[in-house]
Amino acid sequence: MPDSLPTVGCTICGSCHPNDIGAPAERELEFAKVRDRLISSCVKSPCHLQTADGGFRYYPSPDFDLFPNGRSNPFASSLVIWEATNILTQGLSLSWHSDRDQKLCYRRSIKKGEGEMCFRISDRLDCRSLTSETARQAIADFDIKAAALNLIYAALATHVDRPWDQPFAIDSQQIEHYLGLDRRKDLDKQAKLALIESLALQPCQLTVSLDWPRQGAIGEFTLEEHPVWELLDINHHTDPADGHLVGLTLMIRAGRWAEYFLNRKAAREKTAFYQTGILPEFILKAIMRYWQQHEGAVRAIAWLLFKLTVGQTQPVAVSTLLRIGYGEEKVRQSLYDRDRRKKLVRTFEGDLKVLYDYGLHPIFDPVTYPPQLQPMWVKLLTLPEDGEEALEFWMNDAQQDFSITDPSPRYKLSQLMNARILQFELPPEWGRAIADLDSIKFHKTPRRTRTKRVKKPVSTLGGSWVLENRKRKGWSQRKLAQSLGKSQSWVRDIERGRIRIKPALQEKLKQLLERQ
């Protein structure tokens, strides 16, 4: 073995040499290992190399970490990303058609037909659009969990000033953490990496072309077919000792769509858009947790993520949620088959409970979605925990025209097709994050501060005070709720400290509960 190492150039920049990193004392390293070490030490490389237990292991050095506060992160919420997410979650349930070139495409009308966006499926290697038959098979092979990777890419793109020009790096350790795979004990390292690579590549198969109409001060524009996410490189990091795969690093760049929908500078000049929303971390965990048992809930959560970004107070038709969750064909078939109809209603109500458990509380339209149509779990939310109050609750319920235990009305699915949910109440942290994002999106110049008036201190009544005085007076939660014109669940939430009492109601509560 010669005393000096052979001259080995770094394949990243071509200028690093063994002496730059310090030749090891033992001259036993193979030629390829020296090159690997050079590449990993290069300042232009997206990864670095560390030594552990005498062997070489790769630990990628990504550009950014998402969810710095442990809860949420901004993400690109444009219509391009919305529809890309729908494709990955709904697949062949969407309306796919073959164009004149026999390429499968999904078209989305914009501004009542004034414009259009068209999605196609490409080959992973050369980004060429697949023929109809091959594209259908590729869509059928899409994993719904790949939608989580699409959202991760959309979040990472917001950390780049020019995402259509500047790539970002993401590694398998990051993805493993974001998706909660680091807690999975049933998968070994190789299985996790294989799953991560498969999911990471699927969003990069989507291409889009746009014919965008004029919107306000922003003129019309046209974009030829291009990748939604361009995979520039994928590095497979192996342990030189045994050749086993130990990590992945992906270099991703947003497509040209980002120049028009994620361009902060041009948005200030009113020549492009800068459309972002808030991605809560629990959305990714929900996709990974419920994709198998509650696929409809996963599709609805992914859709609502964008819908609630556009307008939190806009009503949502139940028929829309059914079509998104289960596909238009399945809903149509269920309308004419009794067994399918019952199964679909049960599935929808179970999926709605998943949304509720994650903090997306539906507010039902009392006209089109009355208590008779609402799921059983909604009716049981008002059931008191106290034994005596629960007994009184059931006695009062038995005297009502409509009892909780009454069977569901016939043709319930047909009635649900005309029902509406007025809005979904967001978890407080999500709502605050959206408000904060809107206030800083364009870094608006703060208004001149005015002298604030000193408000008189308002005495606040706590939930324990309400509970103590209600029981002292011998009132049930229902009686107090009726006296206030509120629901029993509102009184329960007050007593548990979940919500604050407005000043106007504090005075009324004092009058009711302190009066002998």
Image (cartoon, rainbow, N blue to C red):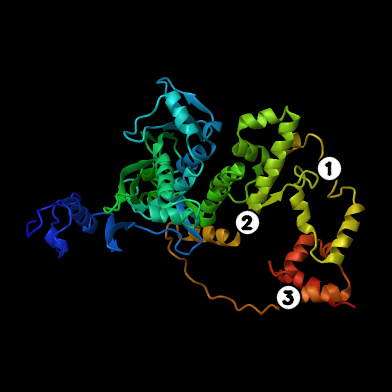
Element type at mark 3: loop
Q: Is 206 situated left or right of 284 in this image? A: left
Give the residue number, with chain letter if any, for mark 1. 407
Closer mark to the observer between disc 2 and disc 1 = 1
Secondary structure, mark 1, is loop
Determine whether 272 is above or below 212 in the image. Answer: below
* Res 138 seen here: yes
> Please, is residue 20 above or below residue 289 in the view?
below
Q: CA distance from mark 3 to mark 1?
A: 40 Å
Q: Amino acid at mark 3?
A: Leu
| Residue at image location 34% in from the left, 57% down from the top | 63
Q: Quadrant of residue 369?
A: top right
Q: Residue 75 placed where, x, y %?
A: 45, 52
Q: Which quadrant: the N terminus?
A: bottom left
Q: Are marks 3 and 2 in contact (CB under 8 Å)?
A: no
Which residue is pictured at 42% across the width and 19% down the height?
100
Q: CA distance from mark 2 to mark 1?
A: 28 Å
Which residue is under mark 2? 359
* Amino acid bearing label 1: Pro
Task: Name the amino acid, label 2.
Answer: Gly
Quick one: SS at disc 2? loop
Q: Tell me the CA gap for discs 3 and 2.
A: 26 Å
- When the figure is inspected, residue 335 is found, relative to residue 287, above or below; the finding is above
